[in-house]
Amino acid sequence: MIVRRLPLLLLLCLSQPLAAGEFDLQAPDEITGLLAPYLPDEVGSPGKLQGLLSEILATEGYFSPVFEFAEQGDGLKLTLDPGRRTTIHSLDLRIDGPVEAGARQELIDGWALPVGQPFRQDDWNTAKQQILSRLLAVEHADARLLDSEASIDTAAHRADLRAHYEAGPRYRFGPLRVEGLQNYSPDLIARYNRIVQPGQPYREDKLNALQTTLQSTPYFASVQTLLDREAAEMDADGNATAPVLVRVRERSPHRVSFGAGASSNTGARVEFNYHTPNLFGQAWELDTGLRLEQKRQTAYADVFLPPDERNRRHSVGVMAEATDIQNLKTERYAFGAQTIQQRGSVEQRLSLNWQNEQREPDGASPVTSRALVPNGMWTWRHVDSLIEPRNGTVLQGQIGGGSKAALSDQNFVRFHARFQHFIPLGRVDTLTLRGEIGYTLADSRQRIPQDYLFRTGGAGSVRGYAYQSLGIKEGNATVGGRYLGIASAELTHWLDEDWGFAAFIDAGDAVDSLQDIRLAIGYGLGARWRSPAGPIGVDLAYGERTRQVQLHFSLAIPF
């Protein structure tokens, strides 16, 4: 028992107004906690107060409470005995219609308010809705609750429940009917539809998945999917086949955007982008733009095709880029083709790229490198959230290479792998472990483009060091080496829904020989803010090798 004092008007009698005073409520702890949010600052009479509390208690299964009011000094004391709680004595659950015996029994066994459990009004409402929702979600799109009753015997403290459902016919998906297309063929919808097929049993989650898939494409501003039950056809067994209606509203055929920002790695930037999802009227997606950063300038154009019959997404692209990072100037021109396919939980990217690179290290001779590189990359994600994971793992591996016999200036094979592992610690803390290794197998790093060698340092790699400052010295410049190793541990603590802080330690290096490995260590603290695009991190890190402090900021989401 606990006593909670609340400022109320002192109750003088059942029919008279109350004078100012204190009100003491004595009741079991769980009852006091239940009633406290509903107690008013003022009451007109104990009769009104008793009626209010009785209604609240009844929703929790207490139908025979005993109230005792007594004057106490200049206040009033209420001793409340809630009485015996009403429990479920019997359940009469009927589901009419062509529901399979196993499915029917599963629904009955899953009833959320079984015999012996205390009666609560919210639980009663939830249990009824749960059965209806499960019927509507799988095959029975016309299901409805015909009637229900909770019969309460206050003397015996028992509740007898009855719920009667009509499942309606079993539905199957019919053909897709698309409304709202102006610039595209219905075949475009079919290219993305690997979910809803004619003849399959109706499932609400499949309709929702199709809607989400189409909504995520570049073609539609809005998508609605529903079963057209009015056009359903019944068979001799009472089953229904209904078309799937897909209503779409197309996006604007042209979109131009401008932006500005800054990165601790490449400095301030401005950006222009043009996008059209219907290049040459073929539903080809063109994404092209110009990005001007302090340390890097890039012009690019990529064309993405709709998925093919094996759900592969093909693309081609061209790029021109100039950089000036760590006293190394580069100019490169590249074009290539890529195909992306989701194979279960693994994303596969296969590509073929050709590039011509001219690099000018400060204090060393300029070098031109060319390479035609087939490359494969596989990413496995098993996390609780793609944007802000707290539990799970992401693994990625890739292999590629070039040959003098096929338009490359050097023979090489490049291996690269990285991982992130997220461990929840309590309710608001997360430990993130990160690792990365790389190796370029070649007689020499000379005449291999920098993309296929390794430099590190900066946000997302080894904090406490400038961007790509860890590598091989060539003159006064830092260039890529053939070996890479990075390890990181970070503990993040969230103060509230929006803000948190992190402590971290990173170690890594890029070298040209295993004998040269001497890990550069950096550690520090950072702030985290949950933005709509994902957590944004601002880190202040100290690099032991350089004995300098670096400021880093980045979008802290997994690769």
Image (tube, grey):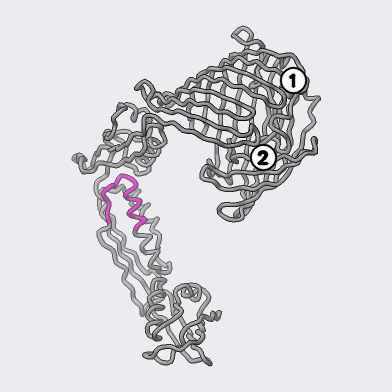
Q: Nearer the viewer, residue 430 or 184?
A: 184
Q: Is residue 404 above or below residue 206?
A: above
Q: Secondary structure at mark 1?
A: loop
Q: Nearer the viewer, residue 256 or 55?
A: 256
Q: Secondary structure at mark 2?
A: strand
Q: Is residue 538 above or below residue 130?
A: above
Residue 133: x and y in percent read: 34, 52
Decide whether residue 131 is among the magenta residues: yes
Instruction: Name the residue tied to disc 2.
Output: 552
Q: Nearer the viewer, residue 528 or 109?
A: 528
Task: Find residue 461 and report its image quarter.
Answer: top right
Callout 2, which amino acid? His
Instruction: Name the residue tied to disc 1.
Output: 362
Task: Of the two numbered discs 1 and 2 on the same chain, state the one appearing first in sequence.
Answer: 1
Image side of residue 222 versus residue 552, left or right:
left
Q: Quadrant of the N terminus?
A: bottom right
* Residue at 33% over, 73% down: 152
Task: Find residue 478 and report its image quarter.
Answer: top right
How far apart marks 1 and 2 lie (CA) works out to: 25 Å
* Residue at 31% over, 40% down: 201
Q: Nearer the viewer, residue 64 or 14?
A: 14
Task: Find residue 484 and report its image quarter.
Answer: top right
Foreground disc of the pair 1, 2: 1
- Dot 1, how many residues are within 10 Å of its Cα: few (below 14), some (14-19), or many (20+)? some
Magenta segment boundaries in residue numbering: 129-144
* Residue at 79% over, 35% down: 546
Q: Is residue 268 visible?
A: yes
Decide whether residue 433 is among the magenta residues: no
Residue 528: x and y in percent read: 62, 47
